[in-house]
Protein backbone atom coordinates (compact mmCIF):
# COMPACT_ATOMS: atom_id res chain seq x y z
CA UNK A 1 0.00 0.00 0.00
CA UNK A 2 1.23 3.54 -0.65
CA UNK A 3 2.65 5.61 2.20
CA UNK A 4 -0.16 7.11 4.28
CA UNK A 5 -0.42 10.90 4.02
CA UNK A 6 -1.39 12.43 7.38
CA UNK A 7 -2.47 15.92 8.36
CA UNK A 8 -2.02 16.68 12.06
CA UNK A 9 -4.29 19.26 13.68
CA UNK A 10 -3.14 20.54 17.07
CA UNK A 11 -3.45 23.45 19.46
CA UNK A 12 -0.47 23.08 21.78
CA UNK A 13 3.15 22.04 22.15
CA UNK A 14 2.98 19.14 19.71
CA UNK A 15 4.39 16.36 21.88
CA UNK A 16 2.02 13.85 20.26
CA UNK A 17 3.20 15.07 16.85
CA UNK A 18 6.81 14.54 17.91
CA UNK A 19 6.01 11.03 19.08
CA UNK A 20 4.30 10.24 15.78
CA UNK A 21 7.25 11.54 13.78
CA UNK A 22 9.57 9.44 15.92
CA UNK A 23 7.61 6.29 15.06
CA UNK A 24 7.82 7.18 11.37
CA UNK A 25 11.56 7.89 11.61
CA UNK A 26 12.13 4.54 13.31
CA UNK A 27 10.44 2.72 10.44
CA UNK A 28 7.61 1.42 12.60
CA UNK A 29 4.98 3.35 10.68
CA UNK A 30 4.70 3.69 6.91
CA UNK A 31 3.35 7.24 6.90
CA UNK A 32 4.25 10.83 6.19
CA UNK A 33 3.01 13.95 7.97
CA UNK A 34 2.28 16.22 5.02
CA UNK A 35 0.96 19.25 6.91
CA UNK A 36 0.38 20.53 10.42
CA UNK A 37 -2.42 22.97 11.18
CA UNK A 38 -2.97 24.74 14.48
CA UNK A 39 -5.97 26.60 15.88
CA UNK A 40 -3.55 28.83 17.80
CA UNK A 41 -0.86 30.98 16.22
CA UNK A 42 1.65 30.46 19.02
CA UNK A 43 1.37 26.67 19.23
CA UNK A 44 4.72 24.98 19.76
CA UNK A 45 3.68 22.17 17.45
CA UNK A 46 4.03 24.52 14.49
CA UNK A 47 7.70 25.12 15.33
CA UNK A 48 8.30 21.37 15.66
CA UNK A 49 6.84 20.84 12.20
CA UNK A 50 8.78 23.69 10.60
CA UNK A 51 12.09 22.44 11.99
CA UNK A 52 11.46 19.24 10.04
CA UNK A 53 10.41 21.04 6.87
CA UNK A 54 6.75 20.07 7.20
CA UNK A 55 4.27 22.68 5.90
CA UNK A 56 2.77 24.26 9.02
CA UNK A 57 0.11 26.92 9.26
CA UNK A 58 -1.93 28.54 11.99
CA UNK A 59 -5.62 28.88 11.23
CA UNK A 60 -6.76 30.70 14.34
CA UNK A 61 -10.30 30.02 15.50
CA UNK A 62 -10.60 33.53 16.91
CA UNK A 63 -9.93 35.09 13.51
CA UNK A 64 -13.07 33.54 12.00
CA UNK A 65 -16.63 34.69 12.67
CA UNK A 66 -18.00 31.22 13.40
CA UNK A 67 -17.17 27.52 13.44
CA UNK A 68 -18.28 26.99 9.84
CA UNK A 69 -16.03 29.74 8.48
CA UNK A 70 -13.17 28.34 10.56
CA UNK A 71 -13.77 24.91 9.06
CA UNK A 72 -13.96 26.38 5.57
CA UNK A 73 -10.38 27.55 6.08
CA UNK A 74 -9.23 24.21 7.51
CA UNK A 75 -10.75 22.23 4.64
CA UNK A 76 -9.30 24.60 2.04
CA UNK A 77 -5.81 24.02 3.45
CA UNK A 78 -6.27 20.25 3.68
CA UNK A 79 -7.31 20.18 0.02
CA UNK A 80 -3.83 21.37 -0.92
CA UNK A 81 -2.10 18.32 0.52
CA UNK A 82 -4.01 15.22 -0.75
CA UNK A 83 -4.55 13.97 2.79
CA UNK A 84 -5.48 10.33 3.51
CA UNK A 85 -6.00 10.72 7.26
CA UNK A 86 -6.58 13.67 9.59
CA UNK A 87 -5.19 13.16 13.11
CA UNK A 88 -6.57 15.43 15.83
CA UNK A 89 -3.76 15.42 18.37
CA UNK A 90 -4.72 17.90 21.06
CA UNK A 91 -6.89 19.99 18.74
CA UNK A 92 -9.13 22.11 20.96
CA UNK A 93 -11.50 23.50 18.33
CA UNK A 94 -14.30 21.67 16.49
CA UNK A 95 -13.33 20.00 13.21
CA UNK A 96 -16.26 19.28 10.91
CA UNK A 97 -15.88 16.05 8.97
CA UNK A 98 -18.40 17.23 6.32
CA UNK A 99 -18.72 13.84 4.69
CA UNK A 100 -15.47 14.21 2.77
CA UNK A 101 -13.40 12.95 5.69
CA UNK A 102 -15.92 10.49 7.15
CA UNK A 103 -14.00 7.53 8.49
CA UNK A 104 -10.73 9.37 7.88
CA UNK A 105 -10.39 11.49 11.03
CA UNK A 106 -9.05 10.14 14.31
CA UNK A 107 -8.99 11.80 17.71
CA UNK A 108 -7.20 10.91 20.93
CA UNK A 109 -8.90 11.55 24.27
CA UNK A 110 -7.27 11.20 27.72
CA UNK A 111 -10.03 9.08 29.29
CA UNK A 112 -12.12 6.02 28.60
CA UNK A 113 -14.93 7.32 26.40
CA UNK A 114 -17.87 7.61 27.13
CA UNK A 115 -16.64 8.63 30.60
CA UNK A 116 -15.16 12.09 31.19
CA UNK A 117 -15.65 13.32 27.65
CA UNK A 118 -17.55 15.94 25.68
CA UNK A 119 -17.41 19.70 25.65
CA UNK A 120 -15.15 21.13 28.31
CA UNK A 121 -13.36 17.84 28.99
CA UNK A 122 -9.84 18.33 27.64
CA UNK A 123 -6.30 18.26 28.97
CA UNK A 124 -5.95 18.60 32.73
CA UNK A 125 -9.69 19.25 33.11
CA UNK A 126 -10.19 15.54 32.37
CA UNK A 127 -7.68 14.33 34.95
CA UNK A 128 -9.00 16.72 37.58
CA UNK A 129 -12.53 15.42 36.99
CA UNK A 130 -11.34 11.81 37.23
CA UNK A 131 -9.66 12.45 40.59
CA UNK A 132 -12.63 14.41 41.95
CA UNK A 133 -14.98 11.58 41.00
CA UNK A 134 -13.09 8.95 42.95
CA UNK A 135 -12.82 6.72 39.88
CA UNK A 136 -10.36 3.85 40.20
CA UNK A 137 -9.70 3.55 36.47
CA UNK A 138 -9.15 5.99 33.64
CA UNK A 139 -7.18 5.62 30.43
CA UNK A 140 -6.89 6.74 26.83
CA UNK A 141 -9.10 6.35 23.77
CA UNK A 142 -8.40 6.68 20.06
CA UNK A 143 -11.57 6.94 18.01
CA UNK A 144 -12.88 8.00 14.64
CA UNK A 145 -14.16 11.55 14.92
CA UNK A 146 -17.54 12.77 13.79
CA UNK A 147 -19.19 16.17 14.27
CA UNK A 148 -19.79 15.69 18.00
CA UNK A 149 -17.12 16.04 20.68
CA UNK A 150 -15.53 12.70 21.62
CA UNK A 151 -18.35 10.74 20.04
CA UNK A 152 -17.27 8.64 17.03
CA UNK A 153 -16.63 4.87 16.94
CA UNK A 154 -13.82 3.69 19.22
CA UNK A 155 -10.71 2.16 17.63
CA UNK A 156 -8.49 1.45 20.64
CA UNK A 157 -8.73 1.93 24.40
CA UNK A 158 -6.45 1.10 27.30
CA UNK A 159 -7.08 1.56 30.99
CA UNK A 160 -4.80 3.25 33.53
CA UNK A 161 -5.29 2.68 37.27
CA UNK A 162 -5.83 5.76 39.41
CA UNK A 163 -3.52 5.73 42.44
CA UNK A 164 -4.44 7.09 45.84
CA UNK A 165 -1.57 9.60 45.72
CA UNK A 166 -2.19 10.75 42.14
CA UNK A 167 -2.26 14.40 41.15
CA UNK A 168 -3.52 15.65 37.79
CA UNK A 169 0.12 15.84 36.69
CA UNK A 170 1.10 12.31 37.68
CA UNK A 171 -2.08 10.86 36.23
CA UNK A 172 -1.61 12.80 32.99
CA UNK A 173 1.93 11.47 32.65
CA UNK A 174 0.78 7.84 32.75
CA UNK A 175 -2.19 8.43 30.46
CA UNK A 176 0.03 10.21 27.95
CA UNK A 177 2.40 7.23 27.92
CA UNK A 178 -0.54 5.09 26.80
CA UNK A 179 -1.56 7.66 24.18
CA UNK A 180 1.94 7.54 22.72
CA UNK A 181 1.45 3.83 22.01
CA UNK A 182 -2.19 3.85 20.93
CA UNK A 183 -2.07 6.68 18.40
CA UNK A 184 0.65 5.18 16.16
CA UNK A 185 -0.98 1.74 16.47
CA UNK A 186 -4.37 3.09 15.36
CA UNK A 187 -2.73 4.87 12.43
CA UNK A 188 -0.86 1.69 11.45
CA UNK A 189 -4.11 -0.30 11.48
CA UNK A 190 -5.81 2.38 9.40
CA UNK A 191 -2.95 2.45 6.88
CA UNK A 192 -3.12 -1.34 6.54
CA UNK A 193 -6.84 -1.16 5.78
CA UNK A 194 -7.69 -3.22 8.86
CA UNK A 195 -10.29 -0.93 10.47
CA UNK A 196 -13.91 -1.57 9.54
CA UNK A 197 -16.62 0.74 10.91
CA UNK A 198 -19.83 -1.15 11.65
CA UNK A 199 -22.29 1.31 13.16
CA UNK A 200 -20.91 2.36 16.54
CA UNK A 201 -18.23 -0.31 16.51
CA UNK A 202 -14.85 -0.62 14.84
CA UNK A 203 -13.85 -4.15 13.87
CA UNK A 204 -10.11 -4.80 13.52
CA UNK A 205 -9.42 -7.30 10.76
CA UNK A 206 -6.67 -9.85 11.42
CA UNK A 207 -3.31 -9.61 9.64
Image: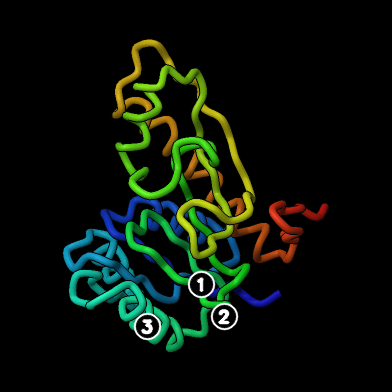
Structural distance between the alpha carbons of marks 2 and 3: 13 Å
Circle on res. 100: 2
Residue 192 is left or right of residue 83, and the answer is right
The quadrant where residue 67 appears? bottom left
Image location of residue 59, percent across then percent down: 26, 75
| SS at mark 1 in the image | loop
| SS at mark 2 in the image | loop
**Circles 2 and 3: CB atoms closer than 8 Å:** no
Structural distance between the alpha carbons of marks 1 and 3: 11 Å
> Which quadrant, please, contains the N terminus?
bottom right
Circle on res. 72: 3
Give the answer, above or below, for where 80 lies relative to 47: below
**Is residue 131 in view?**
yes
Give the answer, above or below, for where 81 lies relative to 165: below
Residue 86 is left or right of residue 64, and the answer is right
Image location of residue 175, percent across then percent down: 44, 34
Give the answer, above or below, for where 197 lies relative to 156: below
- Which residue is under mark 1? 97
Amino acid sequence: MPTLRIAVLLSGAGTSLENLLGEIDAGRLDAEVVCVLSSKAGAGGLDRARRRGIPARAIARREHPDVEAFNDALHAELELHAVDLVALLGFLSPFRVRGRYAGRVINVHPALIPAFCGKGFYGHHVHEAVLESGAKLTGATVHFADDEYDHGPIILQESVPVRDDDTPDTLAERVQAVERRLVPEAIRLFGEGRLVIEGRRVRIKPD
